[in-house]
Image: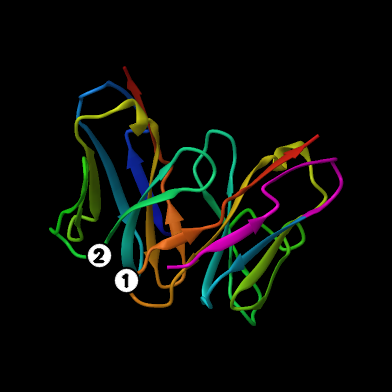
Amino acid sequence: EDKVVQSPLSLVVHEGDTVTLNCSYEVTNFRSLLWYKQEKKAPTFLFMLTSSGIEKKSGRLSSILDKKELFSILNITATQTGDSAIYLCAVLNDYKLSFGAGTTVTVRA
Amino acid sequence: SAVISQKPSRDICQRGTSLTIQCQVDSQVTMMFWYRQQPGQSLTLIATANQGSEATYESGFVIDKFPISRPNLTFSTLTVSNMSPEDSSIYLCSVVGDSKNTEAFFGQGTRLTVV
């Protein structure tokens, strides 16, 4: 059975802190790993990772994939209150998109 | 990319009734998924909807409760049947583009409250 495990499930930080979110997976026929941010209903796309060791960056967010150890991390530097959200990791294979439980990040002013 | 129009955005329904949620995609895509997100939880896959064949349901979900139609490559419906308050959730449809390296796109979501 395909598995996507995120940790921690929640964390609280102060503005300016750096957070690291983890995602490990076990899936057959891996195609890609995706990170999303969810604030309301529909998740917002952040990154798609297909190759090991290549860091993707967007502003203060970055992510990297390790296909040998089957995990990915999402980093947020210099956090702001607007970063407060649920961060979802999902893994796509040839027939299914499976989500982890999500990490709830709360950034306090 | 793909743009998905999902309707309705929200609804309040009486227990025992059924609600049909629609997703219209602006391009043809093979893979379409339906998810449920209960309060405080992540997205749980209900089923994969492939055009021209029966939907594939995940463990814990059955066709009688969540019938799905996929008449063509741009449209799908999910019906939540004989609703109870436990069905109160956000329901999301999602598609993945047919090219190899493509993200998943989501409809706007349907917030369902069963009273």
- The structure residue drawn at horizontal position 32% and vertical position 71%, both measured from the top left corner, is B101
* Occupied quadrant, residue A74: top left
Q: Is residue A31 visible?
A: yes
Question: On screen, A61 above or below A47?
Answer: above
- The structure residue drawn at horizontal position 15% and vertical position 54%, both measured from the top left corner, is A55
* Occupied quadrant, residue A60: top left
Residue farthest top in this picture? A109
- Region of the chain picked out in magenta, as a range: B1-19
Which chain hosts label 2?
Answer: A
* Quarter of the image where the C terminus of chain A is located: top left
Q: Which of labels 2 and 1 is toward the front?
A: 1
Q: Are marks 2 and 1 in contact (CB under 8 Å)?
A: yes
- The structure residue drawn at horizontal position 66% and vertical position 68%, both measured from the top left corner, is B76
Residue farthest left in this picture? A53
Q: Is residue A101 left or right of residue B12?
A: left
Q: Amino acid at mark 2?
A: Thr
Residue bearing mark 1: B101
Residue bearing mark 2: A50
